[in-house]
Image: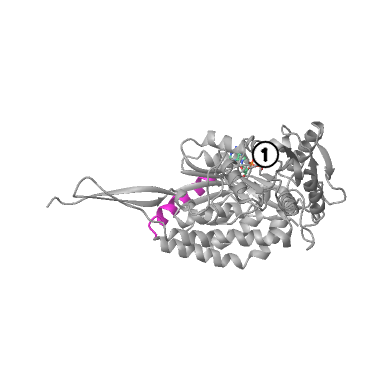
């Protein structure tokens, strides 16, 4: 029996006033699992108006009051992790034991971190030229945010915005894709219990048209977006002069140098390619191997790929579930066909696995001797694929890593400290990880940076949700 979900608008659980809804099927079973209403433009107006009222109220709260609210959310969050993780696996496809539980638990950490950071967010006292003048700065909330988020981490990514956003007194309207909105709507029940003002958080699932209505709404002050570069470009063109945090695609290169621990590099690269079935912006999207260790790396990768256990996400042994959706699976088909056409060699996998309830279960794939101009090398594949490219030496490897329009997180494997710094100084990427997978992050790590992506998270995030206001005092002359 499919569940009928409600939207969270202006502090109320509602069917909305639209006359349409989305019917969602599970990538795991192919079954119709829920219906979610499609909001009307009147619903969106109501969410925006309530968000304004909420941020106008929270603007006057002290940082300590907002921190307490975030800590209440963090505490209530913990009790629901296992139930919500089950929904997440069912709608998204990620393995329940291996990934979904940690994913949901970690999503709550953003409230704890924001609660700590906001208490230390101070302004400056500015020296003045006049004796009777005093000047200081205060961080004010930006206001109403439209937060447009993707389907690969449908709870965690919204919380990356909601944690620091609420802590600084903003109101956020979150728009997840309609087909991964259940776990988020379920978890959103904690906001009311934690005493979040009505309208400070609304959740309105939907497709691109709902996203567009939000980012262009005159009552919205700022946009938070995580998703593909193609959609990011459209949003930037449409939103006008709104403030924004934009986090987009990666093409995570892993470089394996001639002095690397090759077995460790292979394990980390394979993990980076199969974790969440490769549907991660910091996934290992390509491995650039210096020629001397190429054959050794290939052999070690095939061995490491033996650890990938594709299957039903609810079986404890499974560490890779189905892809989330057909366009992602079709992109994998296309990228593999393109690489083979250009002369790459298929080492393992290369197609959808048969015998599952849906066509979205994809075999872990290794391609060798991938030409640089192939789509798997130039674009984000977002699937369980390890494309191996060959570099003559370190200079050639850096060139290959940098010749892409995407740069989010890169990894280098070397046991030579000076070489590690040599690479970090040259790779154009928001993060460079030495001797671990590109799929490595901490919730408080500054993230993003190169190639048109904003740096968010980390301690700086809290400031990005604020406007700096300068207050100038003129004292009596005597
Ligand atoms: P993907 O290609 O991985 O589905 P997208 O970048 O298209 O990723 O989607 C990320 C988020 O952006 C989703 O919530 C999606 O609904 C939303 N979106 C898509 N198109 C638009 C648009 N034109 N304006 C605003 N949001 C959009």
58 and 121: which is toward the camera: 121
Answer with left or right where residue 243 lies relative to residue 175: left
* Residue 191 picture location, percent across and down: 54, 61
* Residue 317 picture location, percent across and down: 80, 62
Q: Which residue is mark 1?
A: 397
**Can residue 51 be found in the magenta stretch?**
yes
- Within 10 Å of the Cα at label 1, are there few (<14), some (14-19), or many (20+) other Cα atoms? many
Question: Most extreme residue toward the right, as rendered?
Answer: 355
Q: SS for tag 1?
A: helix
Q: Which residues are magenta?
A: 44-61
455 and 27: which is toward the camera: 455
Answer with left or right where residue 218 lies relative to residue 351: left
Q: Is residue 354 above or below residue 242?
A: below
Report which quarter residue 333 is drawn in: top right
Q: Where's ligand 1: which quadrant?
A: top right
Name the quarter where the N terminus is drawn.
Answer: bottom right
378 and 462: which is toward the camera: 378
């Amino acid at each position: 029996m499919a569940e009928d979900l409600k939207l969270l608008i202006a502090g109320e659980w509602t069917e909305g006033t639209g006359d349409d809804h989305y019917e969602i099927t599970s990538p795991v079973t192919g079954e119709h699992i829920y219906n979610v209403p499609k909001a009307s433009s009147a619903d969106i107006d109501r969410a925006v108006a309530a968000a304004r009222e909420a941020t106008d109220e929270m603007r006057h709260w002290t940082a300590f009051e907002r921190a307490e609210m975030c800590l209440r959310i963090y505490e209530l969050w913990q009790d629901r992790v296992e139930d919500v993780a089950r929904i997440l696996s069912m709608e998204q496809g990620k393995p329940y034991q291996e990934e979904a539980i940690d994913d949901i638990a970690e999503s709550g950490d953003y409230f704890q971190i924001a609660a700590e950071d906001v208490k230390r967010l101070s302004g400056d006292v500015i020296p003045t030229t006049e004796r009777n003048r005093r000047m200081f700065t205060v961080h004010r909330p930006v206001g109403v945010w439209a937060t447009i988020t993707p389907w690969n981490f449908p709870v965690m990514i919204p919380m990356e915005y909601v944690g620091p956003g609420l802590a600084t007194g903003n109101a956020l309207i979150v728009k997840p894709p309609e087909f991964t909105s259940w776990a988020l709507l379920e978890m959103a029940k904690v906001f009311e219990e934690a005493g979040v003002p009505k309208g400070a958080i609304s959740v309105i699932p939907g497709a691109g048209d709902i996203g567009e209505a939000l980012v262009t709404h005159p009552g919205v002050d700022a946009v938070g977006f995580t998703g593909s570069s193609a959609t990011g470009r459209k949003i930037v063109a449409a939103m006008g002069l709104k403030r924004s945090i934009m986090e987009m695609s990666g093409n995570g290169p892993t470089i394996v140098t001639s002095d690397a621990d090759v077995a460790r590099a292979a394990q980390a690269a394979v993990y980076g390619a199969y974790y969440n079935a490769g549907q991660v912006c910091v996934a290992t999207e390509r491995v650039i191997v210096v020629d001397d260790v190429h054959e050794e790396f290939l052999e070690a990768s095939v061995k490491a790929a033996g650890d990938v256990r594709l299957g039903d996400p609810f079986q404890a042994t499974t560490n890779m579930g189905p892809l989330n959706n057909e366009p992602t699976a079709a992109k994998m088909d296309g990228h593999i066909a393109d690489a083979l056409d250009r002369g790459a060699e298929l080492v393992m996998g290369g197609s959808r696995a048969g015998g599952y309830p849906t066509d979205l279960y994809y075999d872990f794939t290794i391609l060798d001797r991938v030409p640089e101009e192939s789509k798997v090398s130039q674009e984000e594949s977002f699937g369980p694929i390890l494309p191996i490219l060959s570099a003559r030496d370190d200079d050639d490897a850096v060139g290959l890593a940098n010749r892409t329009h995407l740069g989010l997180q890169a990894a280098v494997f070397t046991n030579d400290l000076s070489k590690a710094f040599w690479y970090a100084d040259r790779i154009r990427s928001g993060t460079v990880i030495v001797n671990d997978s590109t799929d490595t992050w901490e919730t408080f790590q500054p993230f993003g940076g190169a190639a048109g992506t904003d740096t968010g998270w980390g301690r700086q995030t809290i400031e990005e949700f604020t406007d700096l206001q300068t207050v100038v005092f003129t004292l009596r002359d005597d």
